Amino acid sequence: MTRTSDTTAAAEIAAEPLVDLDIVDATLRAALDAGGEWAELFAEDRDSASVVLDEGRVEEMNSGRDRGVGIRVTAGEVTGYAHTSDLSAQGLAEAARTAAAVATRQPRGGTVDMMSLGGVALAEPRVAVLPASIGAERKVALLRTADDAARSAHEAITQVTARYGESRRRILVANTHGVCAADDQVRTLFSVGCVASGDGGLQTGRETVGYTVGWELFDDHDPAELAERAAQRAVTKLAARPAPSGEVPVVIARGGGGVLFHEACGHGLEADLVRKGASVFADRVGSQVAASGVTLVDDGTMGPEWGALAIDDEGHPTQRNELISDGVLTDYMWDWLRSRDEGRVPSGNGRRQSYTHLPMVRMTNTFVTNGDIDPADIIADTPWGVYVAHLGGGQVNTATGDFVFGMTESYLIEDGVITEPLREGNLIGNGPQVLLDIDALGNDFAMGSPGTCGKDGQGVPVGDGQPTLRVRALTVGGTAA
């Protein structure tokens, strides 16, 4: 594929199927002829590039392309999978027969009907300017702008690392039930990390922005402003006091704690974990699992957020899935395999890292919806507690919901006022209990930073968010009494 400098040429590229549909049809039929009862072809063509500026020097400049096809075949309850970078008719037929051989060792005696694929609605990139059409020198210039801005923000800034990343992922999905769909996914990301040095030792601050958009990301997001915010975050933490320890009310800033609900609650609502008995939410549809007023949604249509997709990696349209409604568990997230077994319709949550991986149930953009309280009133109504501006990574046991998350930016609340910054501590609790203990929901909903969700060795882009909210009690793992 030739990289282009305008969106018209990009649309022409998108109009070319990754695999000729006659070959797709023949490949699927080969899988059925070899004993399969159902077959799926997943074709992917991914371009990616990144640049890292560290201490004013370009330390990394990477680009790559990966192109291939995965064939999934089922026979009864058994699934076979094979993948190949050989997109010829012969190479794909061989992969189809290999996948079928895994699913069944004996050819079936009868015939299996295959629905006609018809035509495929070929996707065009939903961006104004493809990042690949922009020269490397302009990308490096943005990184240098961020580096200069961060260092100029405060004399305490001693180290700056800035990163730019882009990706374009074209997919084609077809199966023997007549699904035939395509998507063209473009994502652009910019991140700045700063280290500040002072009497409080070394402290870090980071700011990241990323969306399913092209180069137009920088029409709305100034790298210099991102860098200044990252620098200020690091400098503020130099004067931080030790975080308290023990159980306290915790107010989580809008967009800053969505990862908690993604990890501690969202994974437990994925149908594969539910069916394995590895979810605390198993068999609880219709039960009150959260405080009244709490609604949790997963929405793959939420463009241009980081987890937005036109179709999932099984070819089904993404949709808005309300998982918890006014505190009541209403549904789980479904891929094709789990929905087939339960007589359900897929919810657009079948996702995979690449053509070399089998799909599984995954989140897209997961968030708690707005309440009706002014966030300032939530703070004023909290005599004592912790205000969390940003949560970091953590660990979760999906079977129990128990979690530990790092607080990368937090402050003390005293007499209804946000006061001193706190050194990084941990939030410790239980996801289902947090849902029940939310006692105030703000009206200032926002999505948080872009993320990559890891599950069973696969990573996919996701988004999360929430309004300002208060949990009546969470354990803070700090060092102060």
Image: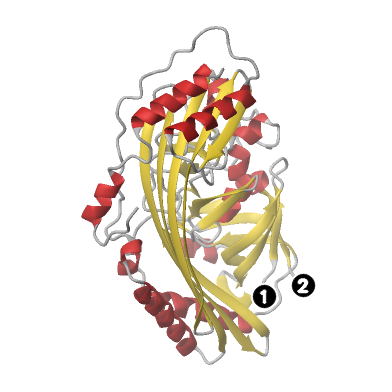
Residue at disc 2, secondary structure: loop
Q: Badge 1: few (under 14), some or many (20 or more) residues near its Cα, within 10 Å?
A: many
Between the C-alphas of marks 2 and 1, the distance is 9 Å
Q: Nearer the viewer, residue 43 or 259?
A: 43
The quadrant the C terminus occupies is: bottom right
**Above or below for 202 versus 289:** below
**Above or below for 126 versus 358:** below
2 and 1 marks in contact (CB < 8 Å):
yes
The amino acid pointed to by label 2 is: Thr
Q: Nearer the viewer, residue 293 or 36?
A: 36
Q: Is residue 193 left or right of residue 370?
A: right
- Spot occupied by residue 41 in the image (x, y as percentages of width and height): 46, 32
The amino acid pointed to by label 1 is: Arg
Mark sitting on residue 423: 1
- Spot occupied by residue 156 in the image (x, y as percentages of width and height): 56, 90
- Colour scheme used in the picture? secondary structure
Task: Spot the residue most to the bottom.
Answer: 155
Task: Spot the residue most to the left.
Answer: 8
Residue found 39% across the figure and 77% down from its top: 142
Residue found 43% across the figure and 32% down from its top: 89
**Above or below for 145 versus 410:** below
- Residue underneath mark 2: 479
Residue found 65% across the figure and 29% down from its top: 275
Residue at disc 1, secondary structure: loop
Q: Is residue 181 left or right of residue 71?
A: left
Of the image marks 2 and 1, the number of the one nearer the N terminus: 1
Quarter of the image holding residue 95?
top right
Q: Is residue 304 visible?
A: yes
Q: Is residue 359 visible?
A: no
- Spot occupied by residue 366 in the image (x, y as percentages of width and height): 50, 47
